[in-house]
Image (cartoon, rainbow, N blue to C red):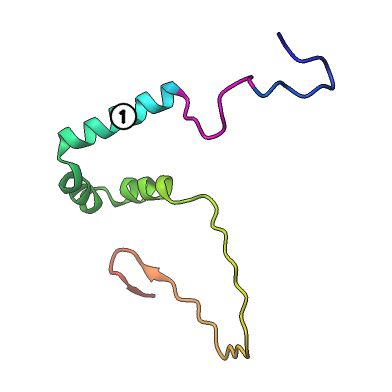
Amino acid sequence: MAAPKGQPKPESSGRKKGVVNKTTADIKEMINNALHLAGGEDYLVRQAGENPVAFMGLIGKILPKQVDLDANVNGNLNISKIVRSIIDPINNTDS
């Protein structure tokens, strides 16, 4: 039964915070098993060379979406130069 309008939900309702949906957990396990059968790390290394765009997309999926950082700097911070360099992905050099 739903909580009355304007009233908080009882603590016993729904999944506990941080518990993964069963379907999501099952799919992650299947992906892990498929990776193991395909060759594990060796397969991923091969894909990094053969399919770098897809591999970097995979890297983007596993990186944290948000990073908490405490950037207190004590003392003087002298920035004398900021350089922006565009790298040619084919030749791996500055353009």
Describe residue 91's horizontal placement relative to residue 1 as left or right: left
Secondary structure mostly seen in magenta is loop
Rendered position, 14 above or below 88: above
Q: Which residue is at 56% across, 28% downward?
A: 16
Where the C terminus falls, by quadrant?
Answer: bottom left
Rendered position, 84 above or below 1: below
Q: Which residue is at 52% across, 35% downward?
A: 18
- Residue 13 position in % (x across, y down): 64, 19
Determine if the magenta segment contains residue 18: yes
Q: Please give the residue where the numbered disc 1 appears in the rendered image.
A: 29
The residue stretch that appears in magenta = 12-21
Report the residue that reaches farthest toward the top.
Answer: 1
Residue situated in front as seen by the camera: 36 or 51: 36
- Residue 79 position in % (x across, y down): 58, 88
Describe residue 38's horizontal placement relative to residue 22 as left or right: left
Determine if the magenta segment contains residue 36: no
